[in-house]
Image: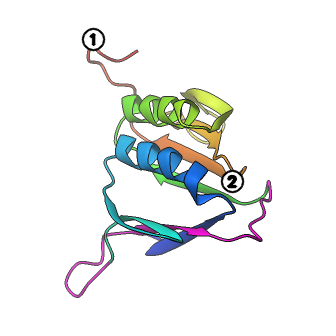
């Protein structure tokens, strides 16, 4: 089951958010599908016959606020993708809120990283698969 169809995140500075979201969404293999003066769009909207897609909009909102109880978690297809997500976030104006690693208190293979966007919104990328056995895994 895919729980979310689409989600929106509000930021007060879209210019600062743009390189951040462009980089983290690209790190997760998610395409940017539009850019407007007050919004950025990533992913694909669901349409008849295809209900598996999901969509993220980042909106400019002068009254945007953050709350530590609110966060958005994105699925990653590998632990390497989680690490790439974290590195992309830090390199593009985000801050670390929990480095890539196992969170065994959720389950044995819960591998995640937590960041904050330039606005302070809490984001996470998670992979639920066992550690890769390839020599490129770090």
Q: In which quarter of the image is the C terminus?
A: top left
Q: Which residue is drawn at 46% across and 73% down?
A: 6
In this rendering, position of residue 33 left or right of residue 35: left
Which one is nearer the viewer's eye here, 34 or 81? 34
> Mark 1 = which residue?
135
Q: What x and y, as percent, mark residue 16?
A: 59, 49
Mark 1: secondary structure: loop
Residue 12's tag is none
Q: How crowded is mark 2: few (under 14 residues within 10 Å), some or many (20 or more)?
A: many
Dot 2 falls on a residue whose secondary structure is: loop
Q: Is the magenta stretch mostly helix, strand or loop?
A: loop
Residue 10 within the magenta-colored segment of the rendering: no
Q: How crowded is mark 1: few (under 14 residues within 10 Å), some or many (20 or more)?
A: few
Q: Which residue is drawn at 50% across and 70% down?
A: 39
Q: What stretch is highlighted in magenta?
A: 46-68
Residue 52 within the magenta-colored segment of the rendering: yes
Q: In the rendered image of this protein, does residue 26 appear above or below residue 13?
A: above
34 shown above or below 102:
below
Q: Where is residue 4 in the image (x, y as percent from the top left)?
A: 47, 71
Residue name at image x 55 percent, y 28 percent: 100
Frontmost of labels 2 and 1 is 2
The numbered mark at residue 121 is 2
């Amino acid at each position: 089951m895919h729980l979310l169809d689409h989600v929106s995140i509000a930021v007060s500075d879209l210019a600062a958010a743009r390189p951040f979201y462009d980089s983290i969404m690209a790190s997760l293999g998610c395409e940017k599908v539009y850019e407007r003066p007050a919004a950025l769009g990533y992913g694909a909207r669901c349409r008849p016959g295809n209900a598996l897609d999901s969509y993220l909009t980042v909106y400019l909102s002068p009254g945007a606020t953050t709350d530590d109880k609110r966060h958005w978690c994105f699925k990653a297809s590998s632990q390497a993708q989680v690490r790439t997500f974290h590195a992309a976030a830090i390199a593009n104006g985000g801050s670390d809120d929990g480095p890539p690693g196992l969170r065994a208190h959720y389950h044995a293979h819960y591998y995640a990283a937590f960041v904050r966007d330039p606005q302070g919104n809490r984001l996470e990328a998670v992979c639920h698969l066992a550690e890769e056995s390839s020599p490129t895994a770090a």
